[in-house]
Amino acid sequence: MVESRDIAGWMARCATAALAAFALAQPAAASTAPITAYYYDPALTGYSFPGPQQAVMTIDVKASIGGTCGFATGAAPSGTVNAGQIDVSAWTQDVPFTVECTAPWRIAVSSQNGALKTAAAGATGYATKAPYDVALTLPWDTGFATGTVTASCPVAEIDQAAGSTPCDFEGAASTANGLLVPRSFGLSGSKMTVSAPAYSGTDVLVEGTYNDTLVVTISPAS
Amino acid sequence: MKKIAYIAMAAAAMAATPAMAQSASGSVAVTGWVGGKCTAQTPIAGAIDLGDLATSAGLINSTFSANVGGLSRSFSVICTSANVNITVSSDALNNSTDSTTGGGYTGRVHYTSTLTANKASGGTASAVYTTADVLPAATTTALGGRLQNATNNLTVTVSNGTTTNSGDVLKSGNYSSTILITVSPV
C-alpha cells in the first residue's frame, strides 16, 4: 500500500511538471531519454539500488509576449494635403494618426518624388520641383514615463530614391530602421506635419500642378 | 519497485512563441499648384531721352543721334508659363502744344519700338511696332518657349524717326510719347 501511494504521488508530481512544461515552456534542449528511478524500500536494508531514488529533470522554461504594432482602425495616415499656390503662400498641414504598439516601435516616411513635382517640362533657370518639410510628433507612454518624440527632415532626405540620408525616419520602418519610439498605444496627438514657406528659389517654378505621395510605415522595434 | 518516468519533452514544443512582428502603413498625397503668370522684378518704367529730334535743317533726325543715355532700356520679368506673349505699342511723339501737321510743318514724329525677349532655349523673339497718324493695333509676338530666367531679359529700343511728310520741318517744343509693354503667359 505504501508503495502504491508513493507511486501515485510520484506520477502526480511528474504529470504536474509535464503539464507546466507543456503549457509554458519551449525547452532549450528537449530530452526524450528514459529516466529510471527506484523506490528505496527501507525494508531492504543493505540493498544496492541500481539507480537514483528520484528522477530529476531540468527544464528551461522560456516565454515571451510578442509586441503588436499597427495603426488604430481607421486612424492610419491618409488623405490629401492641398498646399495651394506654393510659389505665393506658405503652407502647413497636420496629418493625424493613432498608433497601437505595445512595445517600442519605429516609424519611417518615404516620399515618392522627394519634393512636390510637376510633370511639366522645365528649362534652364526653371524648376519642376518644390521642396517642403516633413515633421513627426509622436507621444509615447510606457506606463512608467511619458514623452514625445519629434523629428523633422527636408522631404528630399526621404526621397525613395535618395538612399541613405541623415534623416532619422527615411525609408521604410523595420525592426532596425526608422525613428524609435518607446511605446504608444491609442495615444492622441500623433501627427505628421508637412509644410513649406512660399517658394523662393532662384529657379522659377514652372506653371502646373505639383504632387507627391508620402508613405508612412511603422514596425515593432527589435 | 521500479518506477519509470518516461516523459516526451517534445510535446513542449508548442509552448509560447512570440507573436509575429507586424508593420503597417498609410499613404498621404500632397498637392500644390503654380499658376501661369509673368511678374516684373522691377517696375517696367523709365525714360528715353531722344534729345533734339531735328537736324540742323529742321527735319527729323531719323537715327535720334542726339539721344541722351541711349535708345534702349532693359527690364527683368519672370514668367512661369511654357510660352509667353510680348506686346508693344505706343503713340507718336507729339508736340505738347501743337501736334498738327500742315503748311510744311509738323508737331508729330513717328517712330518704331522694338521689344525683344530672350528665350530660355537661346535666341530672341521680337515684337515691332511703328506709329502712324492712325495708330495700328498693338503688336504681339509669341516666344514659342520659356522666357529666359535672367535679369534684363526684355529690351525695348526706339528707332527710325519719321514725319508724315518727309520734308516737314519740326515745330519747336517738347515732344513726348509712351511705350506700352505687356508680357503675358500663354
Image: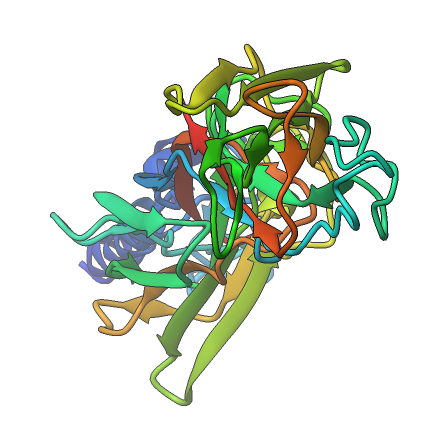
Residue A196 in the image: state x and y as whole percent. 48, 59
Residue B70 in the image: state x and y as whole percent. 84, 44
Determine which quarter of the picture holds residue A88.
bottom left
Total number of numbered labels?
A: 0
Q: Give the left or right position of residue B63, taking residue A71 as reference.
A: right
Q: Nearest the camera: A20 or A6?
A: A20
Q: Nearest the camera: B158 or A36?
A: B158
Q: Is residue B20 above or below residue A178?
A: above
Determine which quarter of the picture holds residue A164.
top right
Which residue is painted at 62% across and 45% down in the image? B171
Determine which quarter of the picture holds residue B8.
top left
Which residue is painted at 57% across and 15% down in the image? B143
Which residue is painted at 34% across and 55% down in the image? A17
Q: Nearest the camera: A166 or A156?
A: A156
Quarter of the picture holding the N terminus of chain A: bottom left
Which residue is painted at 65% across and 18% down in the image? B166
Residue A211 in the image: state x and y as whole percent. 39, 33
Q: Is residue A28 above or below residue A31?
A: below
Q: Nearest the camera: A16 or B146?
A: B146
Residue B43 in the image: state x and y as whole percent. 57, 57
Residue sticking out furthest to the front: B103
Residue A65 visible in image: yes
Q: Is residue A27 above or below residue A185?
A: above
Residue B90 visible in image: no
Q: Is residue B90 above or below residue B46?
A: above
Applied colour scheme: rainbow
Residue sticking out furthest to the left: A74
Q: Give the left or right position of residue A158, taking residue B88 as reference.
A: right
